[in-house]
Image (cartoon, rainbow, N blue to C red):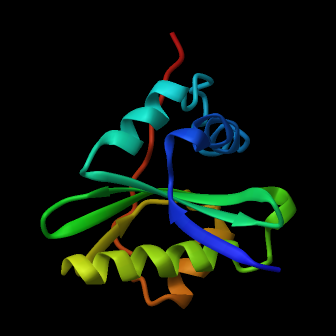
C-alpha cells in the first residue's frame, strides 16, 4: 500500500480535528479537545508543524510538534485505529526526525502517559531515553 507523508494543509483541518479528538487519552478530562481553530494555528505557525500520513485513500495518522532553535517538542503522534500496526507511526517519526536533521535540531522532547506502552515501546526502539517522571493534574470546572 502506498503511503505519503507531507506537511498538513488547510484542506486537512476537518479530518485532523476528527483524528486528534478520536482518542480520549490525549486530553483526559478536557473534553474540548482540539478545535479547528487549534489545528489552523498549528498549520500557520512557522514554529509548529503537523505532518500527515495518507494511506489507502485515508488520513492514516498525524504528528504534531513544536520547533525551537535547539530542540523540538513532539506534542502528539496519533494513528487511525484502522491503520495501526502498519508502520504509520514509525514512518511519521522517521519523517519528523529527517526534518529536524535538515534544520540541525538534535534534541527531541516527548511526554507520554506512563501506561501508554505502545508509544513507550516505539520511543525506546528509536533510542529515546526515559527522563523525569511527572504527575499530571487537571480539574473540570
Which residue is drawn at the image coordinates 13% and 64% (left, top)? Answer: 69
Q: What is the x, y in percent for residue 125?
A: 56, 89
When the figure is inspected, residue 97 is found, relative to residue 79, above or below; the finding is below
Which residue is drawn at the image coordinates 62% and 36% (left, top)? Answer: 17
Image quarter (top left, top right, bottom left or bottom right) of the N terminus = bottom right
Name the image quarter holding residue 77: bottom right
When the figure is inspected, residue 56 is found, relative to residue 23, above or below; the finding is below
Question: Is residue 38 at all visible to an observer of this figure?
Answer: yes
Task: Between residue 58 and residue 34, name the one nearer to us.
Answer: 58
When the figure is inspected, residue 45 is found, relative to residue 55, above or below; the finding is above
When the figure is inspected, residue 111 is found, relative to residue 38, above or below; the finding is below
Question: Is residue 78 at all visible to an observer of this figure?
Answer: no
Farthest residue toward the right?
82
Q: What is the x, y in percent for residue 20?
A: 63, 43
Which residue is drawn at the image coordinates 60% and 28% (left, top)? Answer: 29
Q: What is the x, y in percent for residue 71?
A: 21, 68
Farthest residue toward the left?
69
Farthest residue toward the top?
141
Which residue is drawn at the image coordinates 79% and 68% (left, top)? Answer: 84
Number of marks in picture: 0
Name the image quarter holding residue 18: top right
Q: What is the x, y in percent for residue 5?
A: 58, 70
Amino acid at each position: 500500500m502506498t503511503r505519503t507523508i507531507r506537511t498538513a494543509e488547510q484542506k486537512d483541518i476537518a479530518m485532523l480535528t476528527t483524528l486528534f479528538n478520536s482518542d480520549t487519552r490525549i486530553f483526559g478530562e478536557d473534553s474540548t479537545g482540539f478545535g479547528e481553530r487549534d489545528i489552523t494555528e498549528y498549520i500557520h505557525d512557522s514554529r509548529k508543524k503537523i505532518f500527515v500520513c495518507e494511506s489507502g485513500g485515508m488520513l492514516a495518522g498525524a504528528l504534531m510538534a513544536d520547533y525551537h532553535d535547539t530542540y523540538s517538542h513532539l506534542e502528539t503522534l496519533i494513528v487511525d485505529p484502522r491503520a495501526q500496526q502498519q508502520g504509520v507511526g514509525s514512518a511519521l517519526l522517521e519523517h519528523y526526525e529527517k526534518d529536524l536533521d535538515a534544520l540541525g535540531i538534535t534534541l527531541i522532547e516527548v511526554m507520554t502517559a506512563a501506561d501508554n506502552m505502545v508509544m513507550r515501546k516505539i520511543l525506546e526502539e528509536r533510542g529515546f531515553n526515559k527522563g523525569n517522571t511527572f504527575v499530571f493534574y487537571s480539574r473540570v470546572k
